[in-house]
Amino acid sequence: MNDQPKKILTIDDERAVRSSLRAYLEDCGFAVAEASNSYEGIELLKVSPPDLVLCDLRMPEVDGLEVVKYVSQHLPELPIIIVSGTGVIGDAVEAVRLGAWDYVLKPIEDMALLEHIVLKALDRARLVAENRRYKEHLVEEVRRQTAEIRDQADELEKINAALRQENEEREKAERIIAESEQRYRELVDNLQEGIGSVDSNEVFLFCNPAMAKIFDMTPDELVGHSLLEFLPEPSQTMVRTQTQERSQGRTGTYEIEIGTTKGNTRFAVVHARPLFDARGKYLGASALIQDITEQKKLELHLRRAQKLETIGTLAGGIAHDFNNILTPILGYAELAIADWGNRDRRSDSVQQIITAALRARDLVRQILLFSRQSESSKEPTELHMVVDEAIKLLRSTLPAQIEIIEQLDRESGLAMADATQIHQMVMNLCTNAFHAMEEKGGELAVSLSRIEVDHEMVVSSPGLKPGPYLRLTVSDSGCGMSRALQEKVFEPFFTTKEAGRGTGLGLSLVHGIVADHSGHITLISELGKGTTFHVYLPQIEKSDRQVRVAEPHTLSGAERILLVDDEDQIASMADKILSRLGYSVTSFTNSQEAFERFEARPEDFDLLITDLNMPRISGITLVQKVHELRPDLPVIAISGFSDKISEANCSKFGISHYVMKPVVTKELVGVIRELMDNRLIEP
């Protein structure tokens, strides 16, 4: 009986792995030899074959498959077990196909499992060796005993008993193989990534459940179908190119679009590895497919958000310059009417200038609303009342071939909202729906309900947060939109209408209103099947409403005003208007000079009116420097655009009121009077 310990050869390019294996196996009573690469391992096999080999797959220069091939060709009875950290199942399958007896994935969580696998392999090797020796012995025994068969009946019985034992051993070995195959099947079936193989024509030969799920099928349904059946033309071209590359022995990683059997569109990344027969003929490929559809949705949401943010930044810059241009137009037009009187026929022409300038101002404010850079007055609002009012107006204006279906939950609750903007949003959505049904008519459905947004909805609609919302839904049965159109529909000035029938601001304003209300909007549309918009606005509990300040009865005054604006036309115009109303105005177009004048005699002024965006000293800096000398001095800031200051936060910068340019005389002086009159009645 041989008491020598079994010798195990470990082949791995990582010293730490070899050391850990040696330590454990020697503790288990085995003798261990090491090789740091495939070349060294094969040389040791040639010199002194061990009882068992543990071999890594991924090693520099020559991988572990070469060791498996060498053992299969030269030492077929030597058990070789793959110990690999690679996550590519195709590599493990290939190793088993070439002759590996079993495989273990690194890192090895339970070394006792490795010992069990090693012992089973050694036992199996013993059986194989005994089987071979016994067969050799049997042949010799039969040859020797042919002449003595009559006298060796007892020996024949022994041989029969040995054969029965051999069958039992063979069945045991087959059970071991079946168990190994079962472990492999369970591993593949439970993977979250799609695993499969195709032939040279991209027809599926095998797939796991995760692979079939990507196509909305079961594995049995998918096998036999070609991958190309599910792909649009660009992805088909990509796959054909990759097939040609793999037939030349190259692996590939690429992205495809998949149309499933249920009409869903999915995006996936494919990692493919070529398969060849022993003669080098290309058979097909093994592949791992990862579904990246949700990742694509997040990327699309991010791109849209970045695009709209960029447009909003541009809108702010345009608004600043345009409002500075409109301010003197409005101001001097009002001065002209004041000079000529309302009865002068020239006043009518000037009034048209004012009307056009105000329309231009409203257009700029609409653009700023889209970019979330305009002010809105929000208060707790029962949305169903606003929506109901808008629908009543629509019923009187839309043609009879448009049927309006209204379903509003009167108990849906409150939202912090600007009622005017919500009304405008509903009108824009419904008008857009009307244009989609204008030629053939159809149904316009408007509903409002309360909905609790859960984590599952958050995943499918990036931008939402869990919690209670009021959901406004506007649906039409019109012509629908293509995917390309859906990606542009919220961009300002984008329109599919003919010239003269729209500015292209409707849906972009809707997007701006929703964003300004901390809400979210989704779009579902299909060509020929209509369009549905879902608007989600956060629900709130009841709270106090804002109290608005009444408009002053008089515009004239005698206060001393320091006026600063780097635009000469604006400074001159404001000086003239305020001076005519009785105010004492000292105006500057240079903020540095204005501060020097104030610094000389701070008590000379009752009010500071300043622009914000100025060279040398900005409006915010000027206010800070002025308040160092006169902390009690009230300040009105006027600007064409500011991304930092608004009426809501201006007090943090020491500013009493913030007014957006262009302003009409009544609005500006109204703010002055409200501010100064309130100071007079303060205790």
Image (cartoon, rainbow, N blue to C red):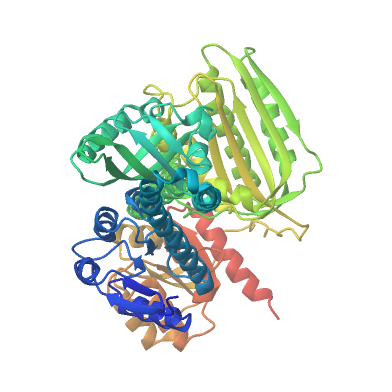
306 vs 313, nearest the viewer: 306
Image quarter in which the N terminus is found: bottom left
Residue at horizontal 29%, vertical 72%? Answer: 590
Q: Is residue 418 above or below residue 396?
A: below
Residue at horizontal 70%, vertical 39%? Answer: 386
User: Residue 81: x and y, percent?
Assistant: 39, 62
User: Residue 379: x and y, percent?
Assistant: 68, 55
Number of numbered discs:
0
Q: Is residue 242 left or right of residue 102?
A: left
Q: Name the outermost residue toward the right.
A: 411
Is residue 521 visible in the rendered image? The answer is yes
User: Residue 479: x and y, percent?
Assistant: 50, 19
387 vs 679, nearest the viewer: 387
Q: Is residue 199 left or right of residue 196?
A: left
138 vs 42, nearest the viewer: 138
Q: Is residue 293 above or below residue 106?
A: above
Can you tell which quarter of the image residue 682 is in?
Answer: bottom right
Q: Is residue 54 above or below residue 161?
A: below
User: Residue 288: x and y, percent?
Assistant: 39, 46
Image quarter in which the C terminus is found: bottom right
Is residue 351 visible in the rendered image? The answer is no
Residue at horizontal 56%, vertical 33%? Answer: 429
